[in-house]
Image: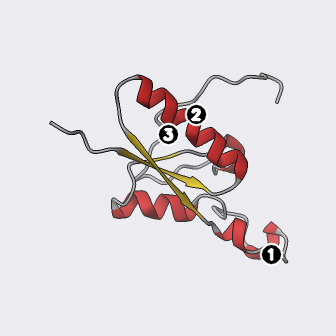
Amino acid sequence: MSVSPIRLATRASRLALWQTEHVAHLLNQAGLPTEIVPMQTVGDQVLDRSLAKIGAKGVFTEELEESLRRGDTHLAVHSAKDVQSTIPPDLELVAFLEREQVND
């Protein structure tokens, strides 16, 4: 029986893709197939204005969260610096990876 892949939402930046590839590798090692789904966020698209001017809340996470809500993806991989301090009530933080540098 074939298992459907876990679809991982991520920003399309180099760092985000690297982090998501790392998560996918860990899941694959556990026997879980994955598919990476890169996305552009408002924060990635609007480069001519400051975050304060475009509305700093969720500019790097909203598109990924909407993908989860629609069921297009199963998990979203974020850098903690991009996540808002208040998580929407319909979503959860379910895992954190070990940090390579604890003072980063």
Query: Which quarter of the figure has residue 5?
Result: top left
Residue 6, compared with residue 90, is above or below; it is above
Q: Going from the N terminus, do you reach mark 2 or mark 1 first?
A: 2
Of 40 and 60, nearer the camera is 40
Disc 3 is placed on an element classified as loop
- The image shows a total of numbered marks equal to 3
Residue 37, compared with residue 93, is above or below; it is below
Query: Which quarter of the figure has residue 4?
Result: top left
**Residue 58: percent from left, percent from top:** 63, 61
Kind of residue at badge 1: Lys
Q: Which label is found at residue 53?
A: 1
Which label sits in the foreground, 2 or 1?
Answer: 2
User: Which residue lies at the image location 61% right of the left edge and 56% below the top edge?
Assistant: 11
Q: Residues within 10 Å of mark 1 (few under 14, many from 20)?
A: few
Q: Which quadrant does the N terminus fall into? A: top left
Of 25 and 47, nearer the camera is 25
**Mark pair 3, 1: CA separation:** 28 Å
Query: Which quarter of the figure has residue 34?
Result: top left
Kind of residue at badge 2: His
Disc 1 is placed on an element classified as helix
Along the horizontal axis of the image, is 47 left or right of 91?
right
Q: Residues within 10 Å of mark 3 (few under 14, many from 20)?
A: few
Q: Which residue is mark 3?
A: 93
User: Which residue lies at the image location 51% right of the left edge and 31% below the top edge?
Assistant: 25
**Residue 36: percent from left, percent from top:** 49, 49
Of 50 and 99, nearer the camera is 99
Along the horizontal axis of the image, is 71 left or right of 10?
left
Looking at this view, name the residue that lies furthest to the front. Answer: 1
